[in-house]
Image: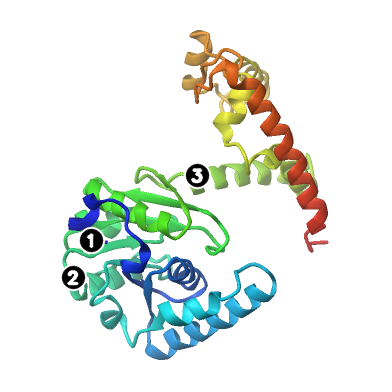
Amino acid sequence: MTISEANAGPASNAARKIAVVGSGYMGGGIAQVLALGGARVALADVSAEVAQKNYDRLLEESEQFIADGLFPAGSTEILKQNLWAAKDIEEAVADADFIEEAVPEVLEIKHQTLSRISAAARPDALIGSNTSTISIADLAEAVTNPERFLGVHFSNPSPFIPGVEVIPHAGTSAATVSASCDLVHAAGKQTAVVKDVTGFVLNRLQYALFHEAAQLVEQGIATADDVDTLVRTTFGFRLPFFGPFAIADMAGLDVYNFCYKSLQTGFPERFATPKILSDLVEAGKLGTKTGAGFLNVPAERTPELIAYRNKAYVAMQKLIEELGPAPIH
């Protein structure tokens, strides 16, 4: 989908031509996702040989995923129809509606790659970067017509992680954001549109958790194994179903406010109460029990929400028991 077509509404990925530049583990997985979603996808890399080698690998992986019950039967045939290895970047992007850059996280490499893409692609083709850390505005400096450029950040392993971070820079057009989200949705993924700040959202949250976990281990408060056990069996157990704001609303924002005060007795600066939380508490908006909080879930929906929560947690525990422990120990 081009910028000019964006306002026409979502289209089937079958009508789209896509190029993925960078065919390694991350880029290859993204190419699988988009090709299985119906798009015609070109793979490009530093050479035709590398692109072809990774194309062959993706087909072999697909066969194994089918055998393991992870891909539906017939997926490899779909990939053979929709995925192809280009001789170079220029051939891959020449007629593409959307190009996803997935080369290593080095600014110079990305700038060089994006410059080549810009020179060879149609002027109205959308261009996304899979960067997880580099400023989208900084990357946009290498793109002609930068209003068509944004971050489209898949997570690893991309065939199996449903969320995609979409990051426009200040000059990205609204049509580009809309068209890119449509493309991702058509491939069966979910999107969240976030601002172009250091770490975006996903990694700010992920590394904040890791930073605190690492300090607990460094200080001898718990072992790495015990921290992992607590995360995956307590609050992490909730996260497939509820984000932090839904969890806070259900717990009660007054409870959260009190817990922050307790944490401040040992860590006054690190656990300063967020103003957005204290403002809600002062306004009497305490979460689901008052029908207003971060997400404003009506109070009358609380019994239905609790029933869903309990059913979800029991189903999660059954799934964990069915899968057995991860092969770490």
Q: Residue at x 60, y 69 (%)?
A: 71
For mark 2, what is the residue? Answer: 122
For the residues carrying marks 3 and 1, which lies nearer the camera in this image?
Answer: 1
Front-most of residues 171 and 13: 13
Front-most of residues 238 and 199: 238
Left or right side of 126 for 37: right
- Could you tell me how far apart the alpha carbons at marks 3 and 2 are, in whole angstroms? 34 Å
Front-most of residues 237 and 76: 76
For mark 3, what is the residue? Answer: 204
For mark 1, what is the residue? Answer: 2
The location of residue 248, given as percent across then percent down, is 60, 26
Q: Are marks 3 and 1 in contact (CB under 8 Å)?
A: no
Q: Residue at x 21, y 57 (%)?
A: 5
**Which label number is shown at residue 251?**
none
Asked whether the viewer can see residue 227, the reply is no
Q: Are marks 2 and 1 in contact (CB under 8 Å)?
A: yes
Quarter of the image for residue 310 reads top right
- Could you tell me how far apart the alpha carbons at marks 3 and 1 are, in whole angstroms? 31 Å
Q: Is residue 257 above or below residue 169?
A: above
Q: Amino acid at mark 2?
A: Arg
Q: Amino acid at mark 1?
A: Thr
Q: Amino acid at mark 3?
A: Arg
Left or right side of 41 for 227: right
The location of residue 96, given as percent across then percent down, is 27, 72
- Could you tell me how far apart the alpha carbons at marks 2 and 1 are, in whole angstroms? 9 Å
Q: Residue at x 56, y 57 (%)?
A: 161
Q: Is residue 34 above or below residue 251?
A: below
For the residues carrying marks 3 and 2, which lies nearer the camera in this image?
Answer: 2
The location of residue 130, given as percent across then percent down, is 41, 61
Q: Are marks 3 and 2 in contact (CB under 8 Å)?
A: no
